[in-house]
């Protein structure tokens, strides 16, 4: 009888973790406008070696933004040590979309997109990310959207700096 209750309880615990893993989801979305054509924004965005000189959030990128490649990005979260996150480049559509995916399935994954849309007077730059998995239920992600906005604003500043220089 006791063994039966233990097995039943363990089964419920496994089921609860599976439900949390399957239903955990957070979405982050920021948009800015950069007064430059998408091709100019794209050239800065996809220059992995240049990130260290302008990006305060993605402070280093090791790898190339080519479909199917692996990229290691050093991320700076305020008040915490930098962390290195590995992602796979899923899609590269020049001057339109850069899509990366990483994480540990079930625990936490991220699907991060940079989207560039030509608009009158420049480019709308969108960062959109969907995180999924068990850990999103417990993770304090309040810093993410402000950090992504900061990275987007730094991208704008870098593009404008290069355009003026």
Image (cartoon, rainbow, N blue to C red):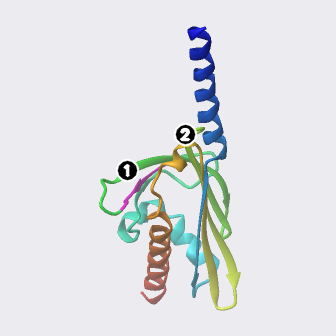
| Pointer 2 or 1: first along the chain | 1
Q: Name the residue at 36% across, 69% down.
A: 53
Q: Residues under labels 2 and 1: Cα distance?
A: 17 Å
Q: Name the residue at 61% across, 40% down.
A: 21
Q: Position of residue 27 (x, y in %)?
A: 61, 60
Quick check: 58 left or right of 38?
Answer: left
Q: Secondary structure at mark 1?
A: strand
Q: Which residues are magenta?
A: 72-77
Q: Name the residue at 54% across, 49% down.
A: 137
In depth, the one of 4 and 69 nearer the eye is: 4
Q: Main secondary structure of the magenta part?
A: strand
Q: Quadrant of the C terminus?
A: bottom left
Q: Quadrant of residue 133?
A: top right
Q: Position of residue 52 (x, y in %)?
A: 37, 64
Residue placed under numbered mark 2 in the picture: 107
Badge 1, how many Cα within 10 Å: few under 14, some, many 20+?
few
Residue 103 sits above or below residue 114 on the image:
above
Q: Quadrant of residue 29?
A: bottom right
In depth, the one of 103 and 4 nearer the eye is: 4
């Amino acid at each position: 009888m006791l063994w039966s209750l233990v097995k039943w309880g363990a089964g419920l615990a496994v089921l609860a973790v599976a439900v949390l893993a399957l239903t955990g989801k957070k979405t982050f979305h920021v948009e800015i406008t950069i007064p430059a054509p998408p091709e100019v924004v794209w050239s800065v965005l996809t220059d992995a070696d240049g990130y260290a000189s302008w990006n305060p959030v993605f402070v280093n990128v090791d790898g190339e933004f080519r479909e199917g490649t692996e990229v290691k990005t050093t991320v700076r979260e305020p008040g915490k040590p930098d962390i290195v996150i590995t992602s796979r480049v899923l899609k590269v559509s020049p001057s339109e979309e850069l899509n990366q995916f990483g994480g540990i399935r079930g625990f936490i994954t991220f699907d991060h997109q940079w989207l560039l849309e030509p608009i009158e007077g420049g480019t709308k730059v969108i960062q959109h990310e969907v995180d999924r998995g068990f850990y999103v239920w417990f993770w304090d992600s309040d810093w993410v959207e402000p950090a992504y906005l900061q990275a987007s604003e730094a991208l704008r500043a870098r593009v404008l700096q290069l355009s003026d220089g």
